[in-house]
Image (spheres, helix red, strand yellow):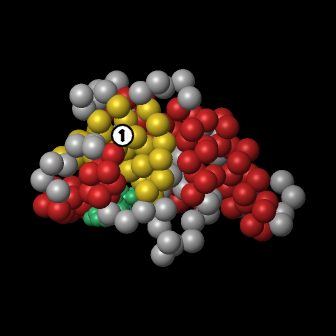
Amino acid sequence: MIRAIYPGSFDPVTLGHLDIIKRASQTVDELIVGVLNNSGKTPFFTIDERVSMLEELIKELPNVKAMSFSGLLVDFARETKATIVVRGLRAISDFEYELQMAQTNHKLNPQVDTMFLATSLEYSYLSSTIVKEVAFFNGDIREFVPEPVIKRVREKVREKTGQVM
Ligand code: PNS
């Protein structure tokens, strides 16, 4: 039984994330999408909003669930009895940080190994930061985030800026 965690901020979840979730869920028995609740950072979406958006998107995937976590990823892995961490690699620029994180996590908990999935070509430029930037200036985010997330991002921008869109 292989249980894996796909961790991230998911602020918000993008089509690139969803692609990794779908592909990883076909490779492992159980996939937990671990949403980092980082008290040191002010996210765009609250932790509950991020988890709820993910829950809506994964409802058709029976072996996937979304959970929030705080603190160290390896502790979350221990608590959930997960042995694999899944991360998407978009470009060489991701590699240094991802390798460092994978090696640190393995050092902290040798039972945890990281599995990298190459991001699908059509999403290799995409990030949650880009989505927020484009949305903030009223750009079209339909190619960036799943359908149910488009509305939520637009609402959030409106909430934060008071603008009428
Ligand atoms: O989507 P992100 O923001 O690139 O995800 C980063 C994340 C959540 C995977 C990473 O910051 C993380 O695992 N944070 C938890 C704290 C931790 O375990 N840090 C040590 C790893 S070097």
Residue 47 image-quadrant placement: bottom right
Can residue 139 be seen in the rendering of this structure?
Answer: no
Residue that badge 1 annotates: 119
Q: Quadrant of ligand 1?
A: bottom left
Where residue 11 sits in the image (x, y, percent)?
A: 54, 56
Front-most of 111 and 92? 111
Decide: is 17 above or below 162.
Answer: above
Residue 55, image x, y percentages: 57, 38
Residue type marked 1: Thr
Q: Quadrant of residue 122?
A: top left
Q: Is residue 107 above or below residue 91?
A: below
For the C terminus, give its image quadrant: bottom right
Q: Residue at x 44, y 32 (%)?
A: 64
Image location (x, y in percent) of residue 152: 71, 48
The reply to whether residue 117 is in sight is yes
Crowd rating for badge 1 (residues with CA inside 10 Å; few <14, some 14–19, many 20+): some
Q: Is residue 100 left or right of residue 64?
A: left
Between 4 and 123, the residue placed more toward the observer is: 4
User: Residue at left 42%, top 53%?
Assistant: 8
Classify 3 as above or below 162: above
Determine the residue positioned at 73% across, 44% down: 151
- Residue that extends furthest to the bottom in the rendered view of this protein: 40
Identify the residue at horizontal 52%, vertical 39% (top origin): 15
- Horizontally, residue 35 falls left or right of residue 120, namely right
**Left or right of 142: which side holds 32?**
left
Q: Residue furthest right?
A: 164
- Is 25 left, or right, of 35 in this rendering? left
* SS for dot 1: loop
- Work out which quarter of the rendered image holds the N terminus and state it: top left
Which residue occupies the foreground of this view, 80 or 127? Answer: 80
- Quarter-wise, where is residue 21 in the image? top left
